[in-house]
Image (cartoon, rainbow, N blue to C red):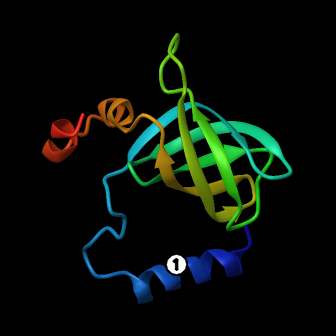
């Protein structure tokens, strides 16, 4: 990554970030597990490194352009079916992509993996 790009990223974060607050809607955790994805014209695989209820960061040899819609398979546990997610690419930088989750097929199982409690109203509707 170029020095100019890093400097812009640093300054942008300083200028637009609310002081002392994380801008993400949900807490992120550092992880390392396999992920497979498919966009309209490309398929790829990678490693998820940073995960929250709202999205993740993926390291991949097949980065996709910003705003690409894709389907993800998150292999969060060995010997279990992957968690399937509809998502979009929020940013792409070299071999990394920021992903926003749009729909999670099994949100309760995903919340359990993250260690996040299932909301009361969701339990009542099950």
Quarter in which the N terminus is drawn: bottom right
**Whether residue 3 is situated above or below residue 59 in the rendered picture:** below
Instruction: Name the residue furthest right.
Output: 41
Instruction: Name the residue furthest bottom.
Output: 15
- Note whether residue 82 is visible: yes
Q: How crowded is mark 1: few (under 14 residues within 10 Å), some or many (20 or more)?
A: few
**Whether residue 10 is situated above or below residue 62 in the rendered picture:** below
**Whether residue 88 is situated above or below residue 123 in the rendered picture:** below
Whole-percent x, y for residue 110 in the image: 39, 34
Q: Which residue is drawn at 42% across and 34% down?
A: 106
Q: Count all numbered tags in the image, as a single digit.
A: 1
Whole-percent x, y for residue 103 in the image: 49, 49
Whole-percent x, y for residue 31 in the image: 46, 36
Q: Which residue is drawn at 36% across and 29% down?
A: 109
Asked if residue 24 lies left or right of residue 82, the reply is left
Q: Which residue is drawn at 51% across and 85% down?
A: 11
Which residue position holds label 1? 10
> Relative to the observer, which residue lies in front, 7 or 113?
113
Residue 60 location, quadrant:
top right
Mark 1 falls on what kind of element? helix
- Note whether residue 117 is visible: no
Instruction: Name the residue furthest top.
Output: 79
Whole-percent x, y for residue 43 in the image: 80, 41
Residue 38 location, quadrant:
top right
Asked if residue 106 lies left or right of residue 66, the reply is left
> Relative to the observer, which residue lies in front, 11 or 53?
53
Asked if residue 121 lies left or right of residue 34, the reply is left
Quarter in which the C terminus is drawn: top left
């Amino acid at each position: 990554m170029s020095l100019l790009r890093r400097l812009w990223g640093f300054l942008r974060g300083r200028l637009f970030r609310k002081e002392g607050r994380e801008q993400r809607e949900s807490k992120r955790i550092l992880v390392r597990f396999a992920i497979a994805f498919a966009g309209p014209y490309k398929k790829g695989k990678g490693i998820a490194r940073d995960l929250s209820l709202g999205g993740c960061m993926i390291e991949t040899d097949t980065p996709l352009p910003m705003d690409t819609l894709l389907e993800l398979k998150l292999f969060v546990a060995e010997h279990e079916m992957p968690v399937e997610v509809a998502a979009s690419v929020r940013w792409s930088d070299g071999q990394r992509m920021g992903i926003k989750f749009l729909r999670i097929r099994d949100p309760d199982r995903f919340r359990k993996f993250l260690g996040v409690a299932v909301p009361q109203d969701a339990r009542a509707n099950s």
